[in-house]
Image: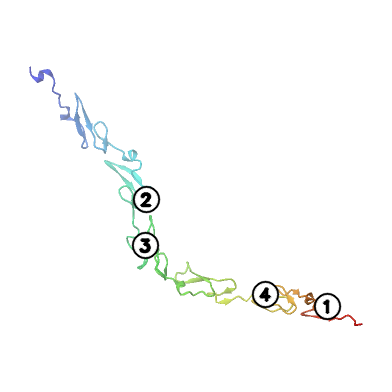
Amino acid sequence: MSKLSNCEVTIDDCRNHRCQNGATCMDGVNTYNCQCPPEWTGQFCTNDVDECSLLPNACQNGGTCRNTLNGYNCACVNGWSGPDCSENIDDCADEPCTTGSTCIDYVASFSCSCPPGKTGLLCHIDDACTSNPCKMGAHCYMNPINEGSFTCNCAPGYTGPRCEQVINECGSNPCQNHATLKLVHYSLSGYTGPRCEQVINECGSNSCQNHATCLDMIGDYSCFCMPGP
């Protein structure tokens, strides 16, 4: 008896298979299956796989996944690159900072660390404050409007472009009773107080002796003695 008479030989159904897109035909009993590559699905591997749905984190750092035929790609946000947007673009690669400064790379930005005597976004401006132009302990800072210039923040009592001028506080004549003010208030004889408005009581020290009566005057006093025996 031949093997054919026992029907033990399986007919190869893959000879006329309909598997597409590089799929492998798997022969069965009176049927076949298509083993699809990862990018395809369906009975005959004719349906494109939506990798963006299967791989929700395929694109990193805010990138947008876009499904394509036989794959996908990532649209990266500013500052990132690479197939999955995981590579930070080096903003210092073109050496934007002035020679002698240090470029510090961030995401989609950079900053320049300036050497002494230089300032500005790219360290391209001479720092006008290096020569200490401000006087009397004033704070110097670069003018953000006019590059290369400086502004002095004066201490109390001083004014001028470099804080070299003393403010004349006597202009309003705040002192009373003919007192003279020279930046610091000086008392006129017989008066006291911030504005010389208070009369000094010279009798407070009991300068008179032997029970004499003290008469206070402006800047002075007199003693009226008791009659003798």
Sequence-wise, which precedes: disc 4 or disc 2?
2
Marks 4/2: CA distance?
63 Å
Sequence-wise, which precedes: disc 3 or disc 2?
2
Rendered position, 128 above or below 74: below
Q: Quarter-wise, where is residue 13 in the image?
A: top left
- Point 20% across, 30% down: residue: 26
The furthest residue to the bottom: 228
Mark 3 element type: strand
Sequence-wise, which precedes: disc 3 or disc 1?
3
Q: Give the number of the mark in front: 3 or 1.
A: 1
Q: Which residue is mark 2?
A: 77
Sequence-wise, which precedes: disc 1 or disc 2?
2
Q: Which residue is mark 1?
A: 214
Q: Which mark is residue 172?
A: 4
- Point 78% across, 77% down: residue: 202
Q: Amino acid at mark 4?
A: Ser
Sequence-wise, which precedes: disc 4 or disc 1?
4
Rendered position, 227 above or below 62: below
Rendered position, 193 above or below 14: below
* x then y, percent, for residue 104: 38, 60
Q: Amino acid at mark 1?
A: Cys
* x then y, percent, for residue 49: 29, 37
Mark 4 element type: helix
Marks 3/1: CA distance?
82 Å
Q: Which residue is mark 3?
A: 103
Q: Amino acid at mark 2?
A: Val
Q: Judge the density around disc 2: few (<14), some (14-19), many (≥20) Cα neighbours within 10 Å.
A: some
Rendered position, 119 above or below 64: below
Asked whether, in this view, residue 92 is left or right of residue 136, the answer is: left
